Image (cartoon, grey):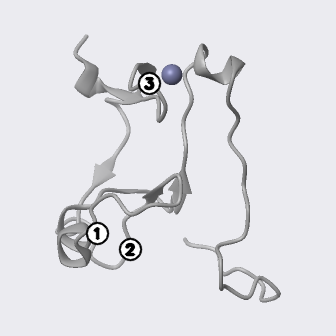
Amino acid sequence: MAAADYRLCDICDGKAFYDSNLCYEDGRDAPDREPYRIAGAPQYADEEVNKRHGYRLGYLGDWAVLCSDCAKSYMVCIVPVPGVDIDEEPSHGG
Ligand SMILES: [Zn+2]
């Protein structure tokens, strides 16, 4: 199967899992939702391009993916976004 059918590892770009059946959407499909980030970074550096072409996947906000080989040496870590007040209760999508 082609690499485009897989979510790739954020370290080595190797196949992490088959994601062809996931319902990715772009700004035309879901203009009311923000594109998700990848390991804290926007998908596109240009804000307008990101808003138009950045993928949405349900209510996913940010993710990082490691293949099984890279997970032996790296880990995913969740930390507060710098400068954001985390005392507020998060609003849940859906
Ligand atoms: Zn990897």
Q: Nearer the viewer, mark 3 or mark 2?
A: 3
Q: Nearer the viewer, residue 72 or 93?
A: 72
Q: Residue furthest front?
A: 73
> Does the numbered disc 1 mark a residue whose Cβ is under 8 Å from ligand 1?
no
Comes first in the chain, label 3 or label 2: 3
Q: Is residue 72 left or right of residue 45?
A: right
Q: Which quadrant holds the C terminus? A: bottom right
Residue that appears at 73% across and 88% down? 85
CB atoms of marks 1 and 2 within 8 Å: yes
SS category of the residue bearing label 2 = loop
Question: Which numbered disc covers residue 33?
Answer: 2
Graded by Cα atoms within 10 Å as few (under 14), some (14 to 19) or many (20 or more), the crowding at tag 2 reads: some
SS category of the residue bearing label 1 = loop
Residue that appears at 77% across and 89% down? 88
Q: Nearer the viewer, residue 69 or 25?
A: 69
Distance (Cα) linking label 3 and label 2: 29 Å
Where does the image place residue 45, in percent across and percent down from the top left?
A: 28, 66
Disc 1: which residue: 30
Question: Which numbered disc covers residue 62?
Answer: none
Disc 3: which residue: 12
CB atoms of marks 3 and 1 within 8 Å: no
Distance (Cα) linking label 1 and label 2: 6 Å
Q: Amino acid at mark 3?
A: Cys
Graded by Cα atoms within 10 Å as few (under 14), some (14 to 19) or many (20 or more), the crowding at tag 1 reads: some
> Does the numbered disc 3 mark a residue whose Cβ is under 8 Å from ligand 1?
yes
Q: Amino acid at mark 2?
A: Arg
Where does the image place residue 79, in percent across and percent down from the top left?
A: 73, 62
SS category of the residue bearing label 3 = loop
Q: Nearer the viewer, residue 74 or 2?
A: 74
Distance (Cα) linking label 3 and label 1: 30 Å
Q: Is residue 52 left or right of residue 87?
A: left
Where does the image place residue 66, in percent across and percent down from the top left?
A: 57, 29
